[in-house]
Amino acid sequence: MYQKYHTDALVLKSREHGEADRVLVLYTKDFGLVWARSSAVRTEASRMRYSLQNYTRANVSLVRGKRGWRVAGAISLQGGSDKIECISTFARIAELAMRLVAGEEENPYLFAALAEAHNALMQGDCPERATIEVVCVARVLYALGYLSADALGTALFTHTAYASEHLHEAEAVREELLSQINRAISETHL
């Protein structure tokens, strides 16, 4: 008998597999980056169909089998935005996270940074999306050990919120933040 795990997850990417299945890249709260297969999710009768769209947040039930993870259930917590700019901003963040995260390892700070950025971007108009993207990328790099909080001399890494006062703080050190981000990304060689 297999054990069922329940966790929050962000759907970073998906691809079709077979006639009705989908392979998903999930960043989960409890397991980190997980590749999971969802059977028959592309059929019209599937209850998980809309919960597992790209760039959504869901509570998923996962089962680890002999061939890897399978999605046994999903309930949508927050869908995507109808604004293409917000979705494309989160898509770039998701792509970077998939490139940098090595595999299954719990990282509560990284999950919180991604989830809060997703929440901020999917709220509606989001006029500060460029700043949210810069701060989220910096937090992803910090969570993975590519950036040092001491080097920037800012409190942006002590929390994962994207409130307006935090974004104004980021704007004040934007040039230095971008310089550190570009240096860290170039040093990853990915």
Image (cartoon, grey):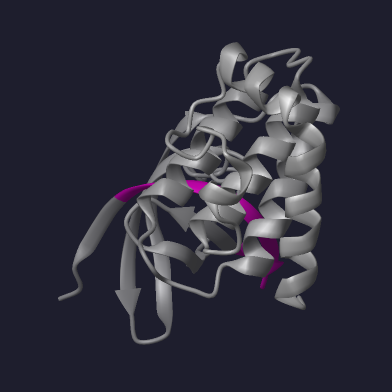
- The residue at the point 56 percent across, 24 percent down is 162
Magenta span: predominant SS is strand
For the magenta stretch, what is the residue range? 7-23
176 and 58: which is toward the camera? 176
Q: Is residue 18 magenta?
A: yes
Residue 111, given in percent of the width and then of the height, sits at 45, 47
**Which image quadrant is residue 166 in?**
top right
Residue 27 lies within the magenta run: no
Identity of the residue furthest to the left in this view: 1
Residue 78 horizontal/vertical position (percent) = 52, 28
Q: Is residue 54 above or below residue 128?
A: below
Q: Is residue 88 visible?
A: no
Quarter of the image that includes the C terminus: bottom right
Residue 60 versus residue 165 in the image, above or below: below
Residue 8, how many percent across, how many down? 38, 44
Which corner quadrant holds the N terminus? bottom left
Does residue 57 show up? yes
- Image-based side of 49 in relation to 69, left or right: right
- Answer left or right for 66 relative to 38: left
Of residues 101 and 21, which is closer to you in this image?
Answer: 101
Viewer-closest of 167 and 114: 167
Residue displayed at 72% across by 31% down: 173
How many marks the image carries: the answer is 0
Which residue appears farthest toward the bottom when viewing the image?
66
- Residue 184, position in %: x, y? 71, 63
